[in-house]
Image: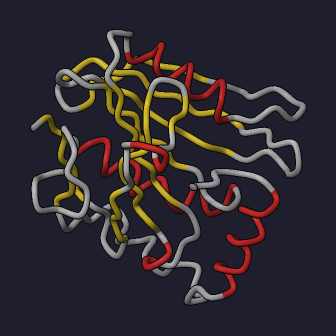
Amino acid sequence: MVRLWGGAGVLVAVLLAGCSSGSDSAGKDGAAAGGETIGADGSPCPLPVTFKLPDGWKAQSVSTEGSDAFAIGDVKLACELDAKPAGMVGFIRVFVGDTGKPSEDVLKAFVATYKGEGPGDSAEKYSAAKIGGADGSEVSYVSHPIDGDGKKEAAFAVKPGARTILVHVGGLDNEEHESMLPGFKLVKESLAAR
């Protein structure tokens, strides 16, 4: 089971932060350079789209079937891009869904669940975007977990074919989130339908 926020998740992330390289710039300058292509058959995460993996990051497939599937709103987690090997603490997560809804509706349903139920304004800012040659939607917001401080997060959703793709970036805290944004931008700008 993937835990996306909460006390235990933060504790694990803090422990992992202690095991990182300790260099604030490790992997950050090269995050947007891009290396391996993810999404194609034979890649760590076969998906309906392809995109460049940020340099130093590691991709891992996640089951979308049966009791192991993790769904938020209309989409299921299919792939995790781990920033730890590049010196950051956090993930870019790729979700896939079969839905006839517009990408903005899918994104809003995701954020409504993911942002948490704690107090405060989520500061959601939606905008239309062209992603992978298709019309999509993107959002930046502040999460509000019940047992922790809110932090910046971002996501985009697009339907370049029959299925909706939603990509989310978080990070241990706001500093880690900012350091992961070049990798998130690389995924968005290199995304293409298969």
Viewer-nearest residue: 10 or 34: 10
Task: Where is residue 43? Give x, y as percent.
Answer: 17, 62
Count of numbered circles on the image: 0
Residue sticking out furthest to the front = 66
Task: Where is residue 118? Give x, y as percent.
Answer: 86, 35
84 on left or right of 101 = right
Image quarter (top left, top right, bottom left or bottom right) of the N terminus: bottom right
Viewer-nearest residue: 76 or 193: 76
The residue lying at 9 percent from left, 38 percent from top is 194
Quarter assignment of residue 2:
bottom right
Quarter assignment of residue 123:
top right
The residue lying at 65 percent from left, 29 percent from top is 113
Residue 189 higher or lower than 166, as above or below: below
Quarter assignment of residue 112:
top right
The residue lying at 38 percent from left, 18 percent from top is 103
Task: Where is residue 78? Give x, y as percent.
Answer: 36, 47
Viewer-nearest residue: 139 or 93: 93
36 on left or right of 145 = left
57 on left or right of 51 = right
The residue lying at 73 percent from left, 74 percent from top is 14
131 on left or right of 185 = left
Viewer-nearest residue: 53 or 68: 68
